[in-house]
Image (cartoon, rainbow, N blue to C red):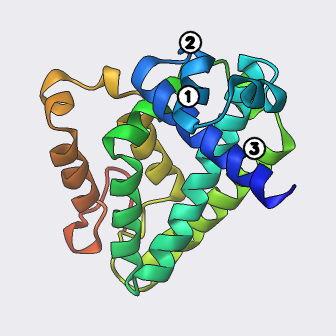
Amino acid sequence: MRADARRNLVKILDAAAQVMAERGVNAPMELMARRAGVGVGTLYRRFPDRDALISALGEHYVQSLADALEEATAGERDAWNALRGFVLWAAAPGRVALAAVLAHVPQEAVAGTAEFAESKERWLGLLDGLVRRAQAEGGMRTDVTREDVVSLLNVFTCHPSGLPDPVAARPEKYLHLMLDGMAAHAATPLPGDRL
């Protein structure tokens, strides 16, 4: 793909993510094109229909998770701090709005491509490596798994409307409290488990 075509693609996906986060999955495609600074014809040449755009947007979102994990890992020597930073980044309001929109789209519309599968495998692999490193360094409980972190993100990013009212009013407070519970210094045996 030519450099200018790649730039336009990224601009369109970033704009579509913003618009859908603000207005939902049925937001006007013309608004997405305008926000991206491209003509509507450019958008439709790249994405002939909304389903194609949503599929690309799902892959773009998962790719952004992988890129953010790499950045967090490279920018922070302490793996536990890198992991906390990534979770807090992923739970920022604009990303939460997009994740919530994508969570309500049929899974096959978002996750049906090889590119999505590759991006998902990449980000989960990076997350797994960071969890294991944080545990090996002594910063994170040894009984927490990658799946536990994914579940935490799922609750706070994909389904914020399901949070109880006090939690929904201050999600960042409760996310911090839950992350604190994953720290090694806070570890107490879980029911039926041993540390």
Using a 10 Å C-alpha cutoff, classify the residue at mark 2 as few (fewer than 14 neighbours), some (14 to 19) or many (20 or more). few
Q: Which residue is mark 3?
A: 116
Closer-to-camera residue (195/156): 156
Q: How many numbered badges does the structure rendering display?
A: 3
Q: Earlier in the sequence, mark 1 or mark 3?
A: 1
In this view of the protein, can residue 108 be seen by the observer?
no
Which residue, given by chain and number where applicable, does mark 1 sit on? 34
Circle 2 or circle 3, nearest the eye: 2
Separation (CA) of disc 2 from disc 3:
21 Å
Q: Are marks 2 and 1 in contact (CB under 8 Å)?
A: no
Q: Residue at x 41, y 61 (%)?
A: 86
Q: Is residue 109 left or right of residue 58?
A: right
Of labels 1 and 3, the one closer to you: 1
For badge 1, the amino acid type reads Arg
The type of residue carrying mark 3 is: Phe
Disc 2: which residue: 26
Residue type at mark 2 is Asn
